[in-house]
Image (cartoon, rainbow, N blue to C red):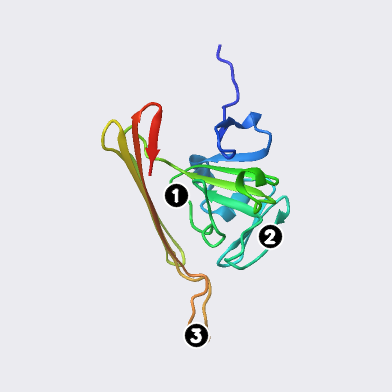
């Protein structure tokens, strides 16, 4: 008779692989597939699935708070009180409004994280990890959508092993949407109109089991 147990969840927010049940920090870990199933496509939508997290859209930037602690500023030059990292690189608030695509995991740590990510993490930290190239085989996907306000989007991913030791991976996303408002004045502006295009490319070289290089 098979026994039932909890699935082991590995997090890397503290610069090493650890079992979430043994990490001495309040954390929430989400897989890329889990984000897709919950319809989470941006940082501000994480607040629907992560306890104690709230995000206010300020136009060019987003004000992020964890347990009510953060820094409210609409200036793109001012860092949030909650640090956001993508693949280990700190992201200014003006960048975190971009959409998710080809994500491996998202880890949200609650409480001050100055030891690992610096003094701009009074409320906590968000770690977004994208998927690396894989030597396991060819894989890919393409997804499109249309909606009202002339909304359209396309997302594509391709992982391609070139040899037993070298693999490349490319991913990209395009989104567009008209404004939710009608300007009846003389300016003819389109407030809130969306036109987003982004992409990533990665290469993995793994000549031995003990060494690998990722570009």
Around disc 1, counting alpha carbons within 10 Å, would you say few (fewer than 14), some (14 to 19), or many (20 or more)? many
Q: Residue 95: x, y in percent?
A: 51, 59
Q: Earlier in the sequence, mark 2 or mark 3?
A: 2
Is 207 situated left or right of 100 in this image? Answer: left
Q: Earlier in the sequence, mark 3 or mark 1?
A: 1
**In the picture, residue 150 is in which quadrant?**
bottom left
Around disc 3, counting alpha carbons within 10 Å, would you say few (fewer than 14), some (14 to 19), or many (20 or more)? few
- The answer to whether residue 158 of the structure is visible from this angle is no
Verify CB contact (< 8 Å) between mark 2 and mark 1.
Answer: no
State the CA–CA distance, disc 2 to disc 1.
27 Å
Q: Is residue 95 above or below residue 89?
A: below
**In the picture, residue 138 is in which quadrant?**
top left
**In the picture, residue 54 is in which quadrant?**
bottom right
Residue mark closest to the camera, 2 vs 3:
2
State the CA–CA distance, disc 3 to disc 1.
35 Å
- Considering the numbered disc 2 on the image, is that residue within a helix, a strand or a loop? loop
Q: Residue 65: x, y in percent?
A: 68, 54
Q: Residue at x 65, y 29 (%)?
A: 22
Q: Nearer the viewer, residue 117 or 199?
A: 117
Task: Specify the farthest residue to the top.
Answer: 1
Name the residue tied to disc 1.
101
Is 154 situated left or right of 118 in this image? Answer: left
- Considering the numbered disc 3 on the image, is that residue within a helix, a strand or a loop? loop
Task: Specify the farthest residue to the bottom.
Answer: 186
Residue mark closest to the camera, 3 vs 1:
1
Name the residue tied to disc 2.
71
Name the residue tied to disc 3.
187
Q: Residue at x 49, y 79 (%)?
A: 189
């Amino acid at each position: 008779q098979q026994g039932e147990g909890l699935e082991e969840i590995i997090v890397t927010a503290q610069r090493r692989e650890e079992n979430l049940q043994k990490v001495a920090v309040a954390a929430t870990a989400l897989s890329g597939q889990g984000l897709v199933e919950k319809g989470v496509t941006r940082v501000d939508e994480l607040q629907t699935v992560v306890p104690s997290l709230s995000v206010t859209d300020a136009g060019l930037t987003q004000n992020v708070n964890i347990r009510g602690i953060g820094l409210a500023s609409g200036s793109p030059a001012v860092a949030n009180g909650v640090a956001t990292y993508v693949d280990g690189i700190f992201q200014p608030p003006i960048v975190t409004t971009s959409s998710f695509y080809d994500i491996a995991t998202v880890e949200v740590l609650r409480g001050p994280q100055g030891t690992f990510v610096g003094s701009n993490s009074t409320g906590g930290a968000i770690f977004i990890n994208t998927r690396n190239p894989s030597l396991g085989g060819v894989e890919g996907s393409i997804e499109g959508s249309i909606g009202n306000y002339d909304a359209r989007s396309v997302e594509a991913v391709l992982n391609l092993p070139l040899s037993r030791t070298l693999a490349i991976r490319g991913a990209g996303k395009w989104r567009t949407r008209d404004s939710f408002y009608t300007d009846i004045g003389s300016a003819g502006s389109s407030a809130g109109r969306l036109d987003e295009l982004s992409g990533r490319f990665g290469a993995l070289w793994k000549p031995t089991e003990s060494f690998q290089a990722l570009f």
